[in-house]
Image (cartoon, rainbow, N blue to C red):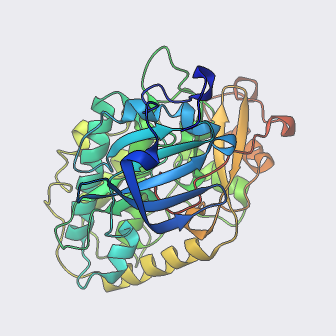
Amino acid sequence: MPVCREQDFWIQQSTKECSFESQYEIGKELGRGATSCVFKCQRRGLPKTWAVKVLLKNTHRRVAKADIGVLLGLDHKNLVRFKEVFESKSRIFIVQELVTGGELFERVVNIGEYSEAVAAKAVKDIIAGIGYLHRCGYVHRNLKPENLLYENLSEDSPLKIADFAQSSVLSTEVDMSSVCGSPGYAAPELLKGERFGSAIDMWAIGIITYILLSGLEPFTCENPSELFKKILKGQYEFTSPEWDEIGVNGKDFIRKLLVVDPNKRLSAEAACRNCWVIGMGASATPLHEVASRIKTFNEQQKSKGPGLEVCSTPHSRAVSRAGPPREMSPLPGVDLHELAAALPDAGDKDRENSPSLLPSEVEIVEPDTDGSGI
């Protein structure tokens, strides 16, 4: 392992005394991005298989900001677990749990009898993982279907939350008004550049639940600025006939999550006790049409060209170019001017109190492009 100076290391808790290659054997490649690769790996002399994501330091500085070393201490059945991190002068090796069950929406379209009850079970797993994350003092900041992965292919496999690259510590000493994420799942306070908390994750769960129960997005409009206005005002409907088969408890759960005021939004602690989440009123009747629409939705997301992600700070909006189809934003083509056009009429704040949206403040952020979930 080449000799490194202290300034060469980005992650305080990474292993620096020995090289990754001296401790692990590299196996089959699982995914590849522009500047990273994911492989199967095994600790030398041990049978368990892990995944390792290898990142080039010169293009992934945002990984250091995620404080991945701190996340090594998280341990919950509904979170993809980080095992350890190795560093060299030019690379970061993130060893994590290997999950093989596929993405949430892929499981939905392949299941024989998809129903409200199946959706409720998936949402329950998401809330359990997010609730643990929040209790540990973290907010995920980038919940979306692509980051929800099943541990294995068994019917009772737990659903796990992945992609902690944007997670932040919830602290009064940390600037919690800086965030990146997919705009289709972004809470109103995030789009407005306001300080945020764990409630942004609950908004994203509301969006995901809406899609799971209908196969449709809650906020849709051909005009991007009008679309942002709908999100900022929380304007959505339970349209007929798409929602005719869904019970009142499921709709009520969504209403309690897609609330513009984050202080009135359901918390993870309250959501885990919600009657629909624990199975009351979640019918086991097959939802064939919903499953078909989810399949179409999923295919459309994967087939779109490069999209955008919103990144807001107190003084700027940044846009992240999405990578291959797996990383597509639900709102491809949205730019800063469209978001700026939506903000003046959003309601509770004057334009001078909103973040500046000057083109000079655009920042391009490197996304995860290898399909690994981290």
Q: Position of residue 205 (x, y in %)?
A: 38, 51
* Number of on-image labels: 0
Which residue is at the front of the view, 156 or 197? 156
Task: Name the residue: 49% across, 14% down.
Answer: 173
The front one of 198 and 135 is 135
Quadrant location of residue 75? Answer: top left
Q: Is 349 on the left-hand or right-hand side of 373? A: right
- Residue appearing at x 85%, y 40% in the figure: 359
> Percent from the top left, x then y, of residue 163?
45, 49
Residue 340: image location, x then y, percent: 76, 42
218 to the left or right of 275: right
Vertical comparison of 45 with 57: above or below:
below
252 vs 101, nearest the viewer: 101
Q: Which of 98 and 250 lies nearest the eye of the viewer? A: 98
**Residue at the limit of the structure toward the right, as seen here:** 360
Whether residue 135 is visible, yes or no, is: yes
Image: 152 above or below 299: above
Does residue 267 appear in the picture of this structure? no
Q: Is residue 65 above or below residue 287?
A: above
Residue drawn at (28%, 59%) of the image: 159
The residue at 37%/40% (across/down) is 84
Instruction: Return the x and y of residue 85 as percentages of the image width and height.
Output: 43, 39
Q: Quadrant of residue 197?
A: top left
